[in-house]
Amino acid sequence: MDYQAATSLLLQKDAFRLRCLQAALSLQLTDWYLGAGFLRNAIWDHLHQHATATPLNDIDLVYFDATDLSISAEQRYTTMLSTLMPDVQWEVKNQARMHLYHQHQPYQNCAEGIQQWVEVPTCVGVRLEADGSFSYYSTFGLQHNWSLELKINPLNPRPALFQQRIQQKGWLQLWPKLRLITAE
């Protein structure tokens, strides 16, 4: 299976997600993705044959700009996105400063920040290119999202947070075909 082609087809059929990607593209950032649940949930909804998309608590736009680590820059982008799509709760984070949160060495690009997210299927992102094509980043490959396996990120394992997120977000109830993998 061509996981990128299958994922692109899902996005092309999803008017809401396309509008979100177009809004993000309009910011003219160089290294950015809409990540985590934005992509993960679309795949899981499709595999569960949900007639309507599972609502997103927020949409994570991550970008990398080592020249401006200010929170005010993130707030400015959030305001711009909220103006374009006021019905969306945007969560904008510059991955050039997120290493401080995780107490890691500085990240070199957006992908290094995405690699730190809690679950394997959450470590994904998609970007709309100017030509209308999609670019993907997936730390472990998109096949993990399509496998319906829910595993902890082995690159940054945080077992207590992993379990907390599964419970609080109700993933196993929303998507009962998910298989929780607790040990390799």
Image: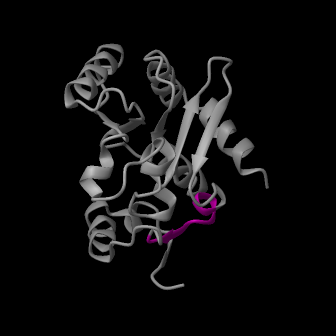
- Rendered view: 40 above or below 166: above
Magenta stretch, residue numbers: 144-152
Instruction: Residue 23 in the image: state x and y as whole percent.
Output: 44, 19
Q: Quarter of the image for the C terminus: give it.
A: bottom right
Residue found 42% across the figure and 49% down from its top: 113
Q: How many marks?
A: 0
In the displayed structure image, the side of residue 142 where residue 156 appears, left or right = left
Q: Quarter of the image for the N terminus: give it.
A: bottom right
Q: Foreground: 145 or 49?
A: 145
Q: Residue furthest left?
A: 72
Instruction: Residue 62 in the image: state x and y as whole percent.
Output: 40, 37
Q: How is the image coloured?
A: one colour
Residue found 63% across the figure and 35% down from its top: 135
In the displayed structure image, the side of residue 177 where residue 55 appears, left or right = left
Query: Can residue 109 be seen from the camera position used here?
Result: yes
Instruction: Residue 169 in the image: state x and y as whole percent.
Output: 30, 60
Query: Can residue 177 be seen from the camera position used here?
Result: no
Instruction: Residue 101 in the image: state x and y as whole percent.
Output: 25, 53
Q: Residue furthest bottom?
A: 183
Q: Quadrant of residue 161?
A: bottom left
- Rendered view: 133 above or below 153: above
Residue found 64% across the figure and 30% down from its top: 12
Q: Foreground: 128 or 116?
A: 116
Residue found 74% across the figure and 42% down from its top: 5
> Magenta span has 160?
no
